[in-house]
Image (tube, rainbow, N blue to C red):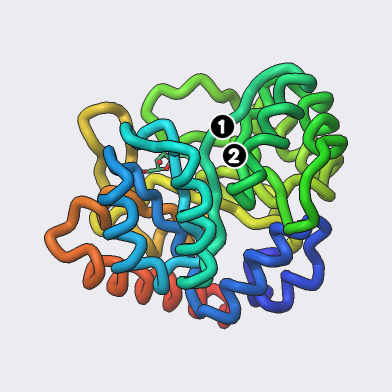
Amino acid sequence: RRLWLSYSERSALAKNPLACRILQLMGEKKSNLCVALDVPNWSELVRLVNLIGSDAVVVKTHYDYIKDWKPSCQDELTKLAAAHNFIVLEDRKLGDIGNTIMGQFETLTSWADGLTMHSICGGDSLKAVREAKVDSRPHGVFVVAELSSQGNLISAPYTKKTTELAKEFEDVVAGLVAQNPLLENEPGFVQLTPGVSLKAGGDNLGQKYVTPSDAVLARGGDLIVVGRAITRSINPKETARQIRQELWSAYERRIAE
Ligand code: 6AU
């Protein structure tokens, strides 16, 4: 079962190269933190990366959130990733016909290791990812199976169909973006779980939060996305350390069960 095996054991079972690399790095760094750097300008992103990059396994960007993003940021981010040993996930949530996805995937993977995408357009959009011409670094997609936001339109059959597509395209799918332990018998996939803060609750625009330990133990998350709880904290480094610690000890409890 996925939830009882260690990340290192699971890295050997992953069919997608990016899932394999992420699981390996989680074991090496002893971290299951993915930090979401939704900040308005590049200098702020660099400041935060230098504070917390070594605590995170994955840095998740929304490049179009950054008002002064320019092409040179791509190279700079690659250098920061090498310096702090993290993986870059651009949360672009692609969702279009196969041909469009193919072009977007080829362009964005010139700097991002992984991308998020919606399954709304069906299997051929994943076939496009499979057929895209990319460099030899490990790449893959995280497919949105469930959302953390209040009133979102994803239904149970949509979630189920998305998990089936992930299995069908296991060579390109690194894992699912999910709120519940889907794919329980598939240890090679990484469950990316957002909507996590120090306390349960939400914001005033529909985001819902669970605690770090609930994300790992109750929700089955492997790689846990934490954004504003860290980026808007008075001491981002200290908060990142604390959350990293809570996430890792929840994971250790999970595999010891
Ligand atoms: O911790 P927050 O609320 O500051 O940020 C959560 C991050 C944001 C969202 O775009 C993203 O996680 N997210 C996603 C992802 C990762 O795809 C899915 C989802 O259901 N909820 C969610 O918040 O960057």
Residue type (three-letter) at the residue carrying disc 1: Lys
Instruction: Examine the image and state in which quarter residue 130 appears.
Output: top right
Residue 108, horizontal then vertical, whole percent: 62, 38
Secondary structure of the residue carrying numbered label 2: strand
Residue type (three-letter) at the residue carrying disc 2: Thr
Viewer-closest of 8 and 164: 8
Residue wearing tag 1: 93
Residue 218, horizontal then vertical, whole percent: 47, 58
Residue 195, horizontal then vertical, whole percent: 38, 45
Disc 2: CA contacts within 10 A as few (<14), some (14-19) or many (>=20): many
Residue in view at x 67 percent, y 19 percent: 96
Q: Is residue 122 above or below residue 134?
A: above
Residue wearing tag 2: 116
Residue in view at x 28 percent, y 41 percent: 41
Viewer-closest of 37 and 107: 107
Residue in view at x 63 percent, y 52 percent: 113
Q: Is mark 2 within 8 Å of ligand 1?
A: yes
Does residue 220 show up?
A: no
Secondary structure of the residue carrying numbered label 1: strand
Q: Is mark 1 within 8 Å of ligand 1?
A: yes
